[in-house]
Image (cartoon, rainbow, N blue to C red):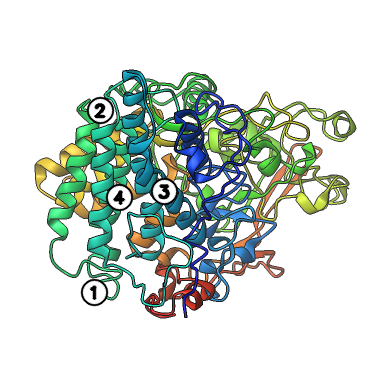
Amino acid sequence: MKKVFYSIITIAVLLFAATSCTDVLDQSPVDSFNQEAVFKDIGLTKAFLGYCYDRIGSHGSAVLGGREDLLDAGTDQLLCIHRPSNYPNVKGTLTPDYMGHYSSTSRGGWLMWSGQYANIQRLNLLLANIDDVPAPTSTEEALKVQMKGEAYYIRAWNHAQLMFGHGGLVLNDQPYELGADFQSITRSTLQQTLDFILADIDRAMTNLPASGMEQGRATRAAAAALKARVLLFCASDLVNGGYEASNQLVSFGTGGQAARWVAARDAAKAIMDGTYGEFSLVGTTDDPPAGGLSEAQIQEYSDIYFNIFNQKGQWNSETIWAIQYPLTGGNYYRPNQWNGPNGYHNWGNNDPIEASVRKFEMADGTPFVWDIGQGDFLRQATAAQLEADPLLNPYNGREPRFYAIVLYHGAPWQQRPTDIAGMEPNNRVQTGHIYDTDGTRIQAGVDTRQARVEAWNGTKNGYYLKKFMDPTSVGQYYRNTNHWVEFRYAEILLNYAEACIEVGTPADIQNGLDALNMVRNRAGLPDRVTADQAEAREFVRHERFIEMFAEGHRWYDIRRWMICPEVIHNQNVYEMQIKEYVNGDMEWLHAAPGNGVVDPALADGREWVDKNYWLPILRNEMNRAPNLQQNPGY
């Protein structure tokens, strides 16, 4: 009996819509057309390609990583307060029958098997027909070649996302026909999958023009950045014998890793050398001022970093590829509403956890240390002590990126809505409560879960995510129009740094540290110095954690480094409880078990099982194509 593999097949009669990228794919709305009509008119073909861009992230309302529920809430960086159970990879509950956000478009859907394959089918359809699209002029003929390059790029992107989550894939470069028999379909090996992706990237580079691409469309530089990311993943321990070494669906085996690190290094270096255009970090990469940073300098460095993610219109020198969202219509982006504090009538959804907050260094580059002689859970300081030593407040004197990424108790933010201003007139985040000197609570913090305003949207762990928000946008009412930056030069530098350090020669380690230190210096931090490979490895892993915080990289990093048991298993999330007294005294209590904490405030329980290094294939997909090989452990 023949069965239709609906998650791979997209019916040829498609409903098109106007694209969401304002600078890119700015097409007029198109009603439904059949396949024959689409590929007889280059304008309709271009609109069809726009729809493929629109679905590059497999989600119908958000492109790439800008979602209501962020991918890194499934790591040791963030807590998604509204749907923590939808991250079953950190609950030990991930199965082919329940994959949460990894199989659903609802608010997540970053790596969906069905959504990615649906777009691959569209792209295969376009690539199979584009050569026959009439192009009466040389300009239109050149446009056809360009669109072919764009389609190859998007197809490589979709396959790469699937490979990062599932390993070896079902590979097919032709559109499926309705009624096709999928009873015998199987997955290709990881090596075959990598070869397929790299071939598409090469085809994209061949067909895309060297310059002149409209902002937001695929470019040679975007293809090169994708190649660098793919090769870094494929050089890492997870796929080089670290997990089921003999299983070719998820491993290259135990040989060849050294050569893969060299390939990853060289792919990043080609971008650094300007092969695909000139890119540079925004801000200075000079050594930070000797003697430490002043408060004003910390703010200056912080603003430079923050504005990378708050840019609108023309991209800055660091952006390799990004998506801009419109104010109205099309796909939407609302990080102010999604992540802003509830005391601004926002939803407080993706919150940094205490363990991640403690990883941010001090402004002079030394590690942050919580314990000031009162244990690892409690800090207390009187107003007089704080005046004499402001660093007794754990949020003072931290590195500039901390102030661009985290909203903490006392952090300045937007003007309060009129109905909140009377409760908190200073426009500072209030994740703690206000107490009288006798210990009586006078007011619940307006940004807490005890607030009188939308308490259900209050943080569960004491922090909010500032990164990605726009200070000029009122999330209660308006969408954001700042970009989601998918590929930026800082990632390339850190990819290069990691690959060099793993290659491991003294010269490579130093080259890697030089690249890493460019990122640190831009952030106002001093150089890392070492000749030891293991220490250098920890340096670059720490830098990736901070520099690319919440951008979606951590989920891949902890898997490819195989450190999930260390950072996830039994690393439960607990609340930071803060008391601010009317006389200026302060208390910060991390309400986790131990050290005399008798009432732990559990925000999220976490557990890790090793099979979750890979996503399973959803049961429904296996039922449609029963000869698909399931991932190990499922």
Disc 1/disc 2 C-alpha distance (Å): 36 Å
What's the CA distance linking mark 3 and mark 2?
29 Å
**Residue ID for mark 1:** 245
Q: Are the residues flagged by discs 1 and 2 in contact, CB closer than 8 Å?
A: no
- Judge left or right: residue 581 versus residue 62: right
4 or 3: tag closer to the N-terminus: 3
Looking at the rendered structure, the secondary structure element under dot 4 is: helix
Q: The C terminus is located in which quarter? A: bottom left
* Mark 1 or 2, nearer chain start: 1
**Horizontal and vertical percent for residue 214?**
42, 22
Tag 1: residue type?
Ala
Residue at the spot of label 2: 276
Question: Label 3 is placed on what type of residue?
Answer: Leu
CA gap, disc 4 and disc 1? 19 Å
- Marks 1 and 4: in contact by CB < 8 Å? no
Quadrant in the picture for residue 417? top right
Of labels 3 and 2, earlier in sequence is: 3
Location of mark 3 (residue): 125
Q: Earlier in the sequence, mark 3 or mark 1?
A: 3
Viewer-closest of 162 and 536: 162
In this picture, is 564 found above or below 1?
A: above
Amino acid type at image mark 2 = Tyr
Q: Position of residue 406 (x, y in %)?
A: 58, 40
Q: Which label is found at residue 230?
A: 4
Specify the amino acid type for callout 4: Val
Tell whether 544 sits left or right of 244: right
Is there a contact, CB below 8 Å, between mark 3 and mark 1? no
